[in-house]
Image (cartoon, grey):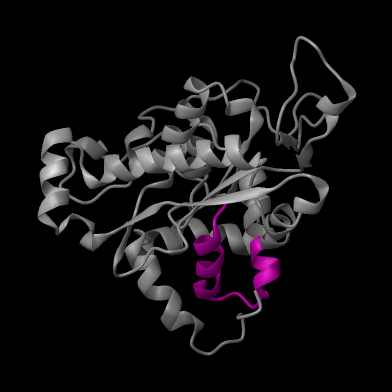
């Protein structure tokens, strides 16, 4: 937000938007109406696009989980009209033993919604003094990692791709941070993605880590926070939460809001409207 008035911010953001699959259609038909009206735009009931597995175009992992039909409750349930029976309040952090509740079991962080704004995300990172330490795990891998003959031979023996190797490393790094440092939050981030580092889809990373921690019996000791650049649609947030993420900070999507045309709102207000549309 501090760079909002930087005249070169648009030039710096545009290559990243292309890199992570943002299109003109997404900006104009999905993101722009959410910023201007605080509501998700209405469209067809269900997914009317061709199956991602049959497309010749590059697709995000999220696209493989789109429904081809409408699935809704009747009457509709949401945290606005049905506030008495539904809430987006999200407790995150280490959990106590559900079979032996103690006063310490209530010592968790309660979020009003799992979609974080910059202020809330930074506040979570500053809770180390309160006993909630954070470990940041990179969701990218270098392009040049597979050039050496030794690495190629090792990969041929193990039959693992660079992607699979990095996913295994992410799981091991997170497990070591929990057992060794006792961290309360694991932040999966795309911040290092660029020309020489390939990003891993946040859905793959979050899902792999969630399942690994369940297998290692460590899942209740930590919260998974995804600082993602490839998340910009309601469907993306829903699949991430369904795959095990506790909270999502879509930092690149927030920067993309500066490119919304026909809107005079400051960036903070645009983010507020976008989050309100996500919750609606």
Is residue 117 one of those drawn in magenta? no
The residue that appears at 29% across and 68% down in the rendered structure is: 196
Image quadrant in which the C terminus is located = top right
Is residue 252 one of those drawn in magenta? yes
In the displayed image of the protein, which residue is found farthest to the top? Answer: 99
- Whether residue 44 is visible, yes or no, is no
Image quadrant in which the N terminus is located = bottom right
> Would residue 132 appear left or right of 74 to someone viewing this image?
right
Task: Specify the quadrant of the image occupied by residue 250.
Answer: bottom right
Query: What is the total number of numbered labels drawn onto the structure image?
Result: 0
The residue that appears at 68% across and 75% down in the rendered structure is: 266
- Whether residue 218 is visible, yes or no, is yes
- In percent of width and height, residue 80 lies at 75, 38
The residue that appears at 35% across and 30% down in the rendered structure is: 68
Establish if 225 lies above or below 11.
above
Closer to the camera, 22 or 198?
198
The residue that appears at 47% across and 43% down in the rendered structure is: 173
Magenta segment range? 249-271
- In percent of width and height, residue 38 lies at 65, 56
- In percent of width and height, residue 83 lies at 80, 32
- In percent of width and height, residue 77 lies at 67, 27
Please tell me whether the stretch drawn in magenta is mainly helix, strand or loop: helix
Closer to the camera, 44 or 169?
169
Task: Specify the quadrant of the image occupied by residue 163.
Answer: top left
Closer to the camera, 41 or 174?
174
Closer to the camera, 147 or 242?
147
In the displayed image of the protein, which residue is found farthest to the right? Answer: 103
Establish if 179 lies above or below 9.
above
């Amino acid at each position: 937000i501090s760079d909002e008035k930087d005249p070169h911010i648009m030039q710096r953001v545009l290559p990243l938007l292309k890199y992570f699959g943002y299109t003109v259609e997404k900006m104009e038909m999905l993101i722009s109406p959410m910023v201007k009206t605080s509501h998700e735009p209405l469209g067809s009931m269900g997914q009317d696009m061709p199956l991602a597995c049959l497309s010749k175009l590059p697709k995000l992992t999220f696209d493989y989980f789109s429904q081809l039909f409408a699935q809704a409750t009747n009457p509709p349930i949401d945290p606005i009209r049905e506030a008495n029976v539904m809430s987006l309040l999200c407790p995150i952090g280490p959990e106590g033993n559900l079979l032996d509740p103690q006063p310490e079991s209530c010592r968790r962080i309660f979020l009003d919604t799992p979609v974080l704004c910059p202020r809330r995300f930074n506040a979570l990172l500053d809770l180390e003094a309160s006993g909630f330490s954070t470990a940041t795990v990179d969701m990218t891998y270098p392009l040049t990692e597979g050039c050496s003959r030794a690495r190629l031979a090792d990969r041929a023996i193990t039959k693992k791709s660079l992607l699979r190797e990095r996913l295994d490393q992410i799981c091991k790094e997170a497990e070591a941070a929990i057992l060794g440092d006792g961290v309360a939050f694991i932040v999966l981030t795309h911040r290092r993605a660029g020309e020489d580092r390939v990003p891993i889809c946040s859905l793959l990373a979050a899902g792999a880590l969630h399942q690994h921690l369940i297998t290692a019996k460590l899942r209740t000791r930590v919260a998974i926070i995804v600082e993602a650049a490839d998340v910009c649609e309601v469907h993306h947030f829903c699949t991430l939460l369904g795959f095990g993420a506790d909270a999502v900070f879509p930092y690149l999507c927030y920067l993309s809001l500066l490119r919304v045309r026909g809107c005079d709102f400051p960036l903070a207000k645009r983010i507020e409207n976008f989050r309100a549309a996500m919750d609606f």
